Image: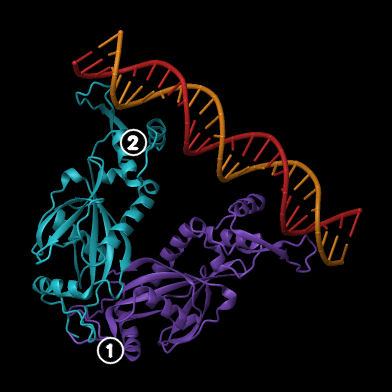
Chain colours: A cyan, B purple, C orange, D red
Amino acid sequence: MKSTKHIAQLTLDCVIFGFHHKKLKLILSKLKLAEEIYALPGGFILQEEDIEDAAKRILFERTSIQDVYLEEFGTFGRVNRMSDEEFQLFSGLAKELYPDVEPPVNEENKKMRIISIGYYALVDFEKVIPKKIDLDESVGWYDINELPKLIFDHQEMVQKGLKVLQENLDKKLLFNNLLPETFTLKDIQELYETVYGKAFPANNFQKKMLDLQILERLDKKFTGAKSKAPYLYRLKSNK
Amino acid sequence: MKSTKHIAQLTLDCVIFGFHHKKLKLILSKLKLAEEIYALPGGFILQEEDIEDAAKRILFERTSIQDVYLEEFGTFGRVNRMSDEEFQLFSGLAKELYPDVEPPVNEENKKMRIISIGYYALVDFEKVIPKKIDLDESVGWYDINELPKLIFDHQEMVQKGLKVLQENLDKKLLFNNLLPETFTLKDIQELYETVYGKAFPANNFQKKMLDLQILERLDKKFTGAKSKAPYLYRLKSNK
DNA sequence: GCAAAAGTGTTAGGCTTACACCCATGC
DNA sequence: GCATGGGTGTAAGCCTAACACTTTTGC
């Protein structure tokens, strides 16, 4: 077989999470297609790059940022994850972008078989301005609870990604990845309440966070609100 | 691209766990190669089969059993997961078994790039007699703490599989998958002690298990030991 | 001073851990 | 009866949950 630039039947899609105004957001690309259909930022993997590097590259293409929390959450490889219609729509676009890639087409149903590896990324919403690539008509942030129509099984991927985020946010203490450099305890609390979909009593939540000994107290944050100013915190560096 | 029977650059490897005599075991295949080298049961994925079905098939090939607990634990796709030497050794064997598969070979280092999806399976050690396929010189159970030399990054896959098992055994209550139909509380305890590598006080462990309300008490197990006979249990069916 | 929100302190309850004890079994 | 391991009961301690209260801020 001749050596191709990309791996023919393997793609990688990123669920890029951001947190803004008490809402969980993710980056979607509106594809350059006749129909209005959206997709997770993704792409084929290069023959010469590690999977993890492919995730970093794909993330960088759409966000221009690096050094981000990234984690794999599963592979998605159902034979019928791509409908006939979607194949028709998508294959033209894929050929344009990846002329070297010619995934085998099933003789019976004329469908491509592509397996996708799912990664999720946690980014600081404020720092990221979604960026278009050739594939995209537009790219932007979307509320996870108000997603437009997604291609293939990307809806499933979002659900699985969210599930894994829920499992890991507290266990691995990932909150700082979704917040700015400095934040209040209330910010963390609201992030938790959004991700877990329930309220946390403020006093106990604060105690729990402070008892972890991973936060460094900084100056107070004066917002002009007619109430006590909360302290700002950042993650202790010696970790 | 012509349609091939298997996906060219994607394999699936299974870490098949069994529990026997207080030891955690897994099935390895001794490959038909000049060098003595072992591998996880695995293989290429068919174009026409779902990933999950591929895992079931590969598991069935080596164990002749079905309806087994199976779960994905990650993808393994470093560019250099296959050494030059391993490529030389393995490619002949692969060509024989999978004549349709011709993974692209890198022009510089002449290496194949293959990504593997890792699944782990939990089986009843007593019910499984490992079975050879063409690829194997032999297949058998090996103590996870005394593994022979494994090919590629299979050692890493075993470690990751074990890590995920440790995370899930208690959380998802998977113990029954590694034990016979009926078992004593002591059996569960010993399984936990093996997987987690530490002792659990018997009385508290029993209480915890019984409080879960998922076990059905059966008759006592008379072994001839000169001590009180323990009760046998099985998982409640209404679950 | 007052309302709003931040932050602290104290107590209650539940779950896990530790210790003590009783029970069945075979010799 | 006695040693052995199974099984049960009870108390201590820790972590979380719930409630009360104080502090700071802008008007």
Q: Chain of mark 1?
A: B
Q: Is residue A174 visible?
A: no
Residue B76 place in picture, x, y as percent = 33, 69
Residue drawn 57% across and 74% down? B125
Q: Which residue is mark 2?
A: A215
Q: Can the viewer see residue A197 in this picture?
A: yes
**Residue type beneath disc 2:** Leu
Kindly identify the amino acid type of the residue bearing the numbered disc 1. Asp
Q: Seen in the image, is A107 located left or right of residue A191? A: left
x and y percent of residue A114 in the render?
24, 74
The Cα atoms of the two marked residues, 2 and 1, are separated by 57 Å
Q: Quadrant of the C terminus of chain A?
A: top left
- Residue for point 36% across, 50% down: A166
Task: Find numbered disc 1 in the image and state the secondary structure of the residue it sits on.
Answer: loop
Residue assigned mark 1:
B100
Q: Looking at the picture, does residue A173 appear above or below residue B95?
A: above
Q: Is residue A32 left or right of residue B108?
A: left
Image coords of residue B19 (percent x, y): 57, 69
Q: Secondary structure at mark 2?
A: strand
Relative to residue C11, is residue A137 depicted above or below? below
Q: Is residue B144 above or below residue A239?
A: below
**For residue B79, which quarter of the picture?**
bottom left
Instruction: Using the image as rendered, state which of residue A36 and residue B218 is in the foreground.
Output: A36
